[in-house]
Image (cartoon, grey):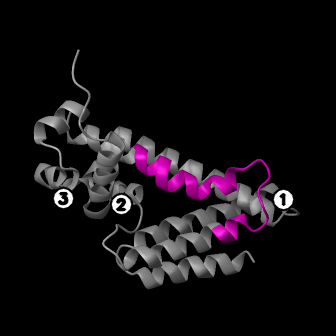
């Protein structure tokens, strides 16, 4: 029977997640991962198979610890009428806070979609599922905010808001102020 790892897998994956999020998969070297996680190459390969295996674990961690907790109020059985506005304000606040630190900004998935890795079928599937989950959550938020709107109007509003959210996550990497302004304007449109 093999020994248990002498490291905390969740901590390693979170460190790798932040590295991939900040630099992008293509710009991260194995040496970068060793430095960020404290693991040796052999431990990385033993635990995750390869860099892509570690990246896939980092993406799942991103969804589970960053994305889903933020949209959870929009997925509740009874969505509050201000849940969508709080979601947008929370994103704007996070962009403002993270931009002043060494933490990554923007969206790991949106950033990855625009790279060569975005051509990978598994990545396209993950990004597509993320978009569908985001759109469904935003749709529930719009329906809660505008209960008298017909389904077509709710869908149109939700599509616009989800698109603005993704645009803001893209902008956050290059122009935080504009990303925050876009989220603020979007939030003001639903108040």
Q: Quadrant of residue 122?
A: top left
- Residue 40, compared with residue 181, is above or below; it is above
The mark closer to the camera, 1 or 2, is 2
Secondary-structure class at tag 3: helix
Quadrant holding the N terminus = top left
Q: Which residue is mark 2?
A: 111
Q: Residue at x 41, y 59 (%)?
A: 110
| Quarter of the figure with residue 48 | top left
Q: Is residue 61 visible?
A: yes
Question: Residue 134: x and y, percent?
Answer: 58, 54
Question: The C terminus appears in which quarter of the rendering?
Answer: bottom right
> Any magenta on residue 72?
yes
Does the stretch in magenta take in 78? yes
Query: Which sits in the foreground, 151 or 3?
Result: 3
**First along the sequence among labels 1 and 2:** 2
Residue 135 relative to residue 118: left or right: right
Which residue appears farthest toward the top when viewing the image? 1
Mark 3 Cα-neighbour bin, 10 Å: few <14, some 14–19, many ≥20:
few
| C-alpha distance separating marks 2 and 3 | 12 Å
Please give the range of residues in magenta: 60-86
């Amino acid at each position: 029977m093999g020994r248990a790892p002498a490291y905390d897998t969740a901590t390693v994956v979170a460190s790798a997640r932040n590295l991939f999020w900040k630099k992008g998969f293509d710009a991260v070297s194995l040496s970068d991962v060793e430095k960020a996680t404290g693991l040796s190459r052999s431990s990385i390969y033993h635990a995750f198979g390869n860099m892509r295996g570690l990246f896939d674990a980092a993406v799942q961690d991103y969804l589970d610890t960053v994305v889903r907790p933020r949209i959870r109020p929009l997925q509740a059985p009874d969505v509050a009428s201000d849940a969508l506005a709080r979601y947008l304000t929370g994103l704007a606040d996070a962009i403002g806070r993270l931009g002043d630190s060494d933490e990554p900004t923007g969206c790991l998935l949106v950033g990855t979609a625009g790279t060569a890795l975005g051509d990978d079928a598994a990545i396209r599937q993950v990004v597509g599922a993320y978009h569908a989950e985001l759109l469904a959550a935003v749709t529930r938020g719009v329906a809660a905010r505008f209960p008298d709107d017909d389904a077509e109007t709710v869908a149109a509003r939700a599509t616009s808001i989800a698109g603005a959210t993704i645009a803001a996550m893209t902008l956050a990497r290059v122009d935080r102020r504009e990303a925050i302004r876009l989220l603020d304007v979007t939030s003001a449109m639903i108040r």
